[in-house]
Structures are given as structure tokens and as C-alpha cells.
Image (cartoon, helix red, strand yellow):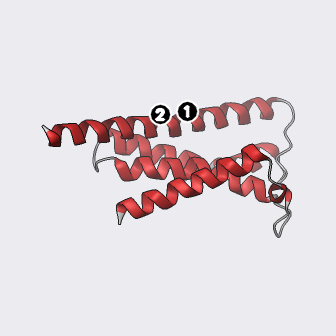
Amino acid sequence: MKKMVAAVLVVVAAFSVWSLVSGANYLEAMLPGGLPLGNVLFPLGPAAVAGVAVLLSVPRTALRLVSVVSLVVAALWLPVSVLLAGNLALNFSGWRDSAWLAYTTAMGLAVLGSLFWALVASLLALRRRAV
């Protein structure tokens, strides 16, 4: 079951990244309330990647804690972004732009770092079992 959930999360992350990199037209579609679809789709990628790190990590370890924290930070990206921007379109000005960029960068580094750590730990565990 864990492998199935991880596979679904990888597909979600890939779809999110592909949509953003390709500049898909549907990203500009407005959801009820005026929120652009792209603003909802973006955080799904990092949250899905962080979810994979959580699934790969062993419970009650530093890796699990870091993975869960990165998942929470990724899940909070949209609410934090809306609070900093003061609007659903995420148009920033002044110091809020820099704060948003710092939060987004830290979130990305945390998510990628936890995934890298989880992958290395999983590969080392597989190697230990094989020996």
C-alpha cells in the first residue's frame, strides 16, 4: 500500500511540475472565489514530494521529523503566500516579495533535502539487508 501511495504522490508531483514548466493554459483558470488554478497546483508538487519522504522514512527518527516538517511547510505555502500578498493572485510588493521568496526557497530546499535524505537512507537500508 505504501508503494502505491508513493507512486501516486510521484505522479501528482510530476503533473504539477510539468504543468508549471510547460506553462499550461489551464493554470490561469479561475476557481470559485477568484483563486487561479496554478496557485493551487503549485504547492501540490512540493507537498507530494515531501509526502514521499515521509513514506520512505522510519517512524520516530530525525528523518521522519524533518520530512513531516517539510510536508507541513509545503502544505502551508498557499495560505502563507496569500497572507503575504494580501490577494489571491499572489501579486507581491515591497518587503513581502522578499519574505515570500525566502519562504518559497526554504520550502523547496527543505522538501528536496528531506527527499534526498530519505532516498539515501532507503538505499543504505536496502544495501544492509542485501549483505
Q: Residue furthest left?
A: 131
Q: Image quarter for residue 130?
A: top left
Q: Is residue 128 left or right of residue 87?
A: left
Question: Is 75 in front, or is 18?
Answer: 18
**In this rendering, position of residue 20 left or right of residue 69:** right
* Residue 126 spot, x, y in % from top left: 23, 42
Q: Which mark is residue 4?
A: none
Whether residue 30 sits left or right of residue 57 in the image: it is: right
Residue under the point 85% across and 30% down: 94
* Closer-to-camera residue (34/84): 34
- Residue 38 versus residue 74: which sits nearer the camera? 38
Image quarter of the N terminus: bottom left
Check disc 1: other Cα within 10 Å, few if <14, some if 14-19, many if 20+. some
The amino acid at mark 1 is Leu
Q: Quadrant of the C terminus?
A: top left
- Residue appearing at x 79%, y 33% in the figure: 97
In this view, 13 is above or below 100: below
Q: Position of residue 75 (x, y in %)?
A: 58, 52
- Quadrant assignment, res 2: bottom left
Quick check: marks 2 and 1 in contact, CB under 8 Å?
A: yes
Residue 12 appears in the figure? yes
Q: Looking at numbered disc 2 in the image, what kind of residue is underneath it?
A: Gly
**Mark seen at residue 109:** 1
Question: How far across and how far down the image is residue 62, in percent?
Answer: 32, 38
Q: Secondary structure at mark 2?
A: helix
The picture places residue 123, in percent across and down from the top left corner, at: 30, 38
Which type of secondary structure does the marked residue at label 1 adopt? helix
- Residue located beneath label 2 in the image: 113
State whether residue 94 is above or below residue 70.
above
Q: Residue at x 84, y 67 (%)?
A: 33
